[in-house]
């Protein structure tokens, strides 16, 4: 028969609750005690039952992470890493739920009370409904936002200042003499409201405020030929823009590559600026707006643990300042601008 938690407790000379905490809440056990418990557990080939630990504590020891895009994207993968860096040592598992519409979101919040399978809910990059917030509040389940569109709805939140970031990007291009601008954003059938929408709105507002010619907005489809379609639309214009502002690096990086394949020089013919400072941005020389989802996620996880422990949070709504990273993809505007 497999060793039980009682066997480990007897052999280690500690209580059953101490064995449970050694695995699920290691910060509550001294290093020496935890080392002893882990060593004995290894000797007995013991595996703690998380369901038993949850039954004893009244908690699921699980955090729900709601994503609206693939978990493999740079931002989502980095957020996942940052959350796990904090939650795993604290004894919590992270469960990912794919939310593709307002209906999906509603179903999740409607069924959460019956499932009771999350001690806290983290919403990544999209909005929540006030009724859903009220439901979690009634259950005393903390709701945490990461780059979400409705910050004030959350028990705690972290986000990049999208409006400031886009303002920095546009002003940089204007300082280089650019007036013919094009904005590229992703197209989605998703009915959720996303925080990145603020970038496009800010872009349009600044172009109008600076009396720039009406900018062209290009929607990048969700097809496999997403960037090729964008390039085709750019090349079909009566005149090339002198600068292209991309919603995110995942558009800007392949766009630079395909523009060069089409005979367009970067930045001599067209400047390109992104948003994220993601993987390969430096390798391709992309000027971009830097955000740090790893740091944001770690802070969100730390605040989540404080909420679960009924601890007070200093400044529960945190806004991170974006930073312009200058590289070779932007330069002075063409003389024909």
Image: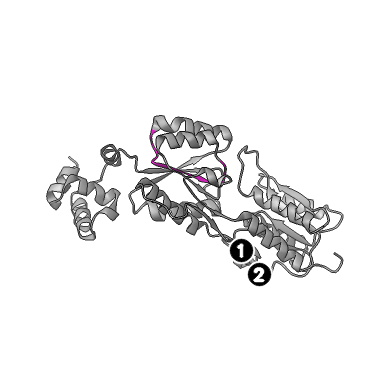
- Where residue 19 appears, as percent x and y from the top left, is 21, 48
Say few, some or many: other residues with alpha carbon within 10 Å of mark 1 (under 14 / 14 to 19 / 20 or more).
Answer: many
Q: Disc 2 vs disc 1: Cβ atoms closer than 8 Å?
A: yes
User: Under tag 1, what secondary structure?
Assistant: helix
| Span shown in magenta | 116-127
Quadrant of the drawing holding the C terminus: bottom right
Judging depth in this view, the residue of 257 and 311 nearest the camera is 311
Q: Which mark is residue 319?
A: none
Classify residue 208 as left or right of residue 221.
right
Circle 1 is placed at which residue position?
A: 281
User: Under tag 2, what secondary structure?
Assistant: loop
Classify residue 305 as left or right of residue 45.
right
Question: Which residue is at 33% across, 49% downward?
Answer: 91
Quadrant of the drawing holding the N terminus: top left
Classify residue 246 as left or right of residue 132.
right
Circle 2 is placed at which residue position?
A: 327
Q: Quick check: is 80 in the magenta stretch?
A: no
């Amino acid at each position: 028969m497999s060793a039980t938690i009682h066997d480990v407790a007897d052999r280690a000379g500690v209580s059953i609750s101490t064995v449970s905490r050694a695995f699920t809440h290691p910060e509550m056990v001294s290093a020496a005690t935890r080392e002893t418990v882990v060593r004995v557990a290894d000797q007995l080939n013991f595996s703690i039952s998380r369901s038993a630990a949850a039954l004893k504590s009244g908690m699921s020891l699980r955090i729900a992470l709601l994503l609206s895009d693939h978990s493999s994207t740079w931002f989502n993968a980095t957020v996942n890493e940052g959350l796990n860096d904090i939650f795993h040592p604290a004894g919590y598992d992270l469960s990912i739920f794919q939310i593709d519409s307002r209906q999906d979101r509603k179903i999740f919040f409607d069924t959460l009370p019956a499932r009771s399978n999350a001690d806290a809910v983290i919403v990544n990059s999209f909005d929540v409904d006030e009724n859903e917030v009220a439901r979690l509040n009634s259950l005393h389940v903390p709701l945490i936002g990461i780059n979400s569109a409705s910050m004030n709805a959350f028990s705690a939140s972290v986000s990049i200042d999208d409006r400031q970031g886009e303002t920095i990007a546009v002003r940089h291009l204007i300082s280089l003499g650019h007036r013919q601008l094009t904005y590229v954003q992703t197209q989605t059938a998703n009915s959720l409201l996303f925080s990145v929408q603020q970038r496009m709105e800010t872009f349009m507002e600044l172009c109008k405020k600076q009396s720039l010619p009406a900018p062209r907005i290009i929607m990048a489809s969700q097809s496999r030929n997403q960037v090729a379609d964008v390039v085709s639309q750019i090349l079909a214009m009566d005149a090339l823009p002198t600068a292209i502002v991309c919603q995110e690096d995942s558009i800007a990086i392949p766009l630079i590559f395909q523009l060069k394949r089409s005979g367009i020089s970067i930045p001599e013919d067209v400047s390109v600026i992104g948003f994220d400072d993601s993987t390969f941005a430096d390798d391709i020389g992309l000027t971009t707006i830097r955000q740090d989802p790893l740091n944001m996620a770690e802070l969100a996880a730390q605040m989540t643990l404080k909420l679960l422990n009924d601890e007070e949070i200093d400044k529960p709504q945190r806004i991170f300042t974006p930073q312009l990273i200058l590289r070779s993809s932007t330069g002075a505007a063409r003389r024909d601008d």
